[in-house]
Image (spheres, grey):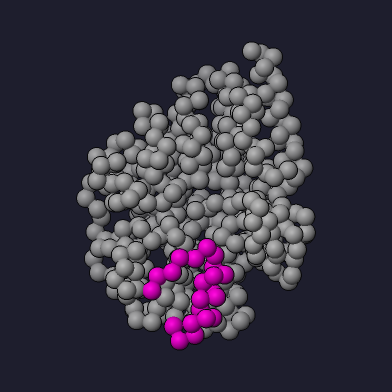
Amino acid sequence: MCLAIPALIKSIENKEAEAEIGGITRKISLWLTPEAKVGDYVLVHTGYAINILDQQEAEETLTLLRQIAKLAEEKG
Amino acid sequence: MKFISEFRRSELAAGLISQIQRRSKTPVRFMEFCGGHTVTIFRYGIRQVLPKTIEMVSGPGCPICVTANADLDKAIALSQTPEVIIATFGDMLKVPGSHSSLQEAKADGADVRTVYSTMDALKIAEDNPDKTVVFLGIGFETTAPTIAVSILQAEEKGIKNYYVLSLHKLCPPVIRVLLDSGEVKLDGLICPGHVSAIIGSRPWEFIARDYGIPCVVSGFEPLDILQSVDMLVSQVENGKSEVEIAYRRGVRPEGNQQALRLMEQVFEPCPARWRGMGEVDHSGLKLRKKYQRFDAELAFDIEPGPTHEPVGCICGDILRGVKTPADCQLFGKACTPQYPIGPCMVSAEGSCSAYYLYGGGLEG
């Protein structure tokens, strides 16, 4: 029930935004993330953005996982 | 970056699995608290790819599953009240209470409507000024702030026919109860990702500090789970117990301060009943005095009658992690997703539903 999915903010009006979720555009509430901007990815739970996704952290995690995969390959 | 497909790459999963196999020496039992994590683990067959040293058990992190029958009965009794519209998230409909379910009540004529968001429930209230809308406030810290917002919006817009039955649950207090019971010995805990998106990682620190159990906050993609298991293994093998965040793109140590502020403004902690764990202090949320006029419990005389538990159902034991669906004699026979007897078979995130749909885990 705590499902939340990434959505890309396309436009903002007051405390509401149009966001793209898996190719579909729908209205979401920004009451919980008033600092969100157009172009941000947010985590959407029951129509509310509950956090802004951190692109840099995501890249760093993936870099770490690629290093782990490379190491695993070397160790056979 | 779409934040989904990147975290499902099989070559990166292979690297993590290989690293876990290399590092894991000590036999351990890890619990994934959250039902969403249970689903990822089953859907992607993660139990099967982990080494024999690692046992995974599912925890009580499914709000629908832990809602006590006495509270379900209240919701069903409310649906029988004339001129009341019940607005609820869809998962609740089929959950059997002591005598019937919301779905059965609806078939008998009650006005029960499934909504995606509290915003939809408010809209129903605005569109039906001569009726009363009661929203079933079920959920953990992830959901409670959205319900707080709906109350603030109802106040702002002067919507007078909107009420909330507050059955929210808070996660950290129940984990303490689980650990204090000593029923399940844990060597690591995968902490819920979207509860932590709101509350942050700090509220889990007592688990690492007081119980010496390593904790990792995880996301919901298969790579997130594997990375979290790897981090737990690393802590165990290095004799550490800390709280780490694997889900760094979605969770910050301090959580979402705005959401916490709004939740705190509208609600205050209270005791709550959990299926399988009984009443737990400070594990529920009730409306603060200032917002009591939105409290369905105070606005209606609810007489649900005596509570009954389904005979033979072991959902309570499964939620505490002491039994698995494989131990239940009803599982897959009398109790299926189509005709569920216990809530863990109803909710998409319930252990029984995950076992039933994805199988494979029964032998483990």
In the image, residue B273 lies in the stretch drawn in magenta: no
Q: Position of residue B132 (x, y in %)?
A: 44, 80
In the image, residue B113 lies in the stretch drawn in magenta: yes
Residue B142, visible in the rendered structure: yes
Question: Is B52 situated above or below B106?
Answer: above
Of all residues, the one furthest to the left in this rendering is B311
Question: Is B267 situated above or below B171?
Answer: below
Q: How many marks?
A: 0
Q: Residue at x 73, y 71 (%)?
A: A14
Span shown in magenta: B111-131
Q: Position of residue B29 (x, y in %)?
A: 46, 30
Of all residues, the one furthest to the bottom in this rendering is B130
Q: Position of residue B188 (x, y in %)?
A: 51, 34
Q: Residue at x 58, y 84 (%)?
A: B158
Q: Residue at x 68, y 24 (%)?
A: A68
Residue B297, visible in the rendered structure: no
Question: Is A29 situated above or below B361?
Answer: below
Question: If the image is split into quadrants, where does the C terminus of chain B sit?
Answer: top left
Q: Residue at x 73, y 43 (%)?
A: B1
Q: Quadrant of residue A37?
A: bottom right
Q: Position of residue A15 (x, y in %)?
A: 70, 69
Observer-nearest of A10 and B40: A10
> In this rendering, would B56 be left or right of B309?
right
> In this rendering, would B92 be left or right of B231?
left
Question: Is A1 situated above or below B286?
Answer: above
